[in-house]
Image (spheres, rainbow, N blue to C red):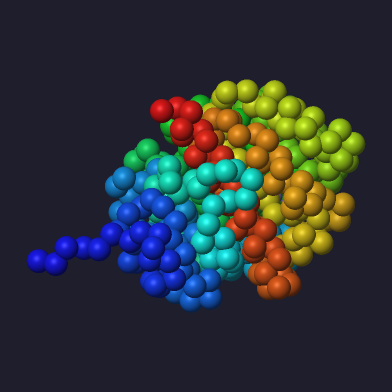
Amino acid sequence: MTKKKVLTELDEFSHSDLAITRESLYGTIAEPVYSGITSLFRRAYRKDLSGADVAVVGIPYDLSVSNRPGARFGPRAIRSASTQLSWGKAWGWGSDPFDKLAVVDWGDCVFDPGRSDRIPEEIEKQISAIVEQDVATLCLGGDHFITYPVLKAYAKKYPDIALIHFDAHCDTWRDEEGRVDHGTMFFHAAQEGIIDPSHSVQVGIRTHNKETHGFTVLSADIVRQQGITETIASILQVVGDRPCYLTFDIDCLDPAYAPGTGTPVVGGLSTAEALEILRGIAGVNLIGMDVVEVSPTYDVGEITSLAAATIAQNLLCLFAVKSSMSV
Ligand code: MN
Ligand code: MN
């Protein structure tokens, strides 16, 4: 029997397809950016979650959009752009999240697009099966509606989830029960007690809704006026040490930084501002996270996919800080 070779840093650029060849779920080994199987950050591509802390899950669904479609291609584009970030540690954190976290790319949720009424239930079922194994998810949208069935899955384990919500849109517009819409799911989630608005915060908003439903709203203007440090303090104050889910709609960023999205709104955060806020809230009790609304057809030079991949990387860093605190 031949002994399996364990890859080390000395093997950099001597391997391809680490997604299926890596032995350990930990660590970072560089492989050529432009080739190989594009799992998120070259993590092991597998359905078996034994030993995993976080499962990356693509949710290629975009039937709830109100403007441009195409977010179903988001997971593939984010995975592809992530290869540009997979050779070293994340900027600004001082450590590699993959030294501490076992992250597996679980692949994509599967559902029948011809049975659109059944899709939310399917997503909830598939995410529930992961969360039940005590594995957190990093979901790649998909339009923003996907966060609703994902939160339903988390609600079975965590009551009164605090939501940290980055977006141009509040997504809390009043709606009738049962409608599937990427602008109303947090109204439903709040009404159903899945999330606790009094400990939830929305960052980067620049669309009107006369009702806040109890959410703290830090509009893009407020972020700009009060500055990043104050914004970080506000988020931490609202969320406290409650179990929180972080959802990042890429249209929180200005279209100059994220043109490839379905519902762009000008006057948004820069990528640098968003990353600084994410670094600043390290220590929050993160239970799950997602990046949504990347529509690659409208992207230019992978600007949006790379921004989404970088945000996903920073979310894993946030999760790694939380995990090392709870040990
Ligand atoms: Mn949204
Ligand atoms: Mn939005």
- Pinpoint residue 73: horizontal percent, then vertical percent: 58, 68
Across the whole image, how many numbered discs are drawn on residues? 0
- Pinpoint residue 227: horizontal percent, then vertical percent: 84, 36
Can residue 121 be seen from the camera position used here?
no
Question: Which residue is the extreme one toward the left?
Answer: 1
Q: Is residue 62 left or right of residue 201?
A: left
Q: Quadrant of the C terminus?
A: top left
Tell me which residue sits at (46%, 32%) in the image.
324
In the foreground, 255 or 151: 255
Question: Which residue is the extreme one toward the front?
Answer: 10
Tell me which residue sits at (40%, 59%) in the image.
9
- Pinpoint residue 4: horizontal percent, then vertical percent: 21, 63
The quadrant where residue 225 appears: top right
Q: Quadrant of the N terminus?
A: bottom left
User: Compared to 21, does 100 lie above or below?
Assistant: above
Can residue 49 be seen from the camera position used here?
yes
Tell me which residue sits at (44%, 71%) in the image.
13
The quadrant where residue 304 appears: bottom right
Q: Is residue 51 left or right of residue 252?
A: left
- Pinpoint residue 153: horizontal percent, then vertical percent: 47, 41
Question: Which residue is the extreme one toward the bottom?
Answer: 35
Tell me which residue sits at (82%, 50%) in the image.
268
In the foreground, 81 or 260: 81
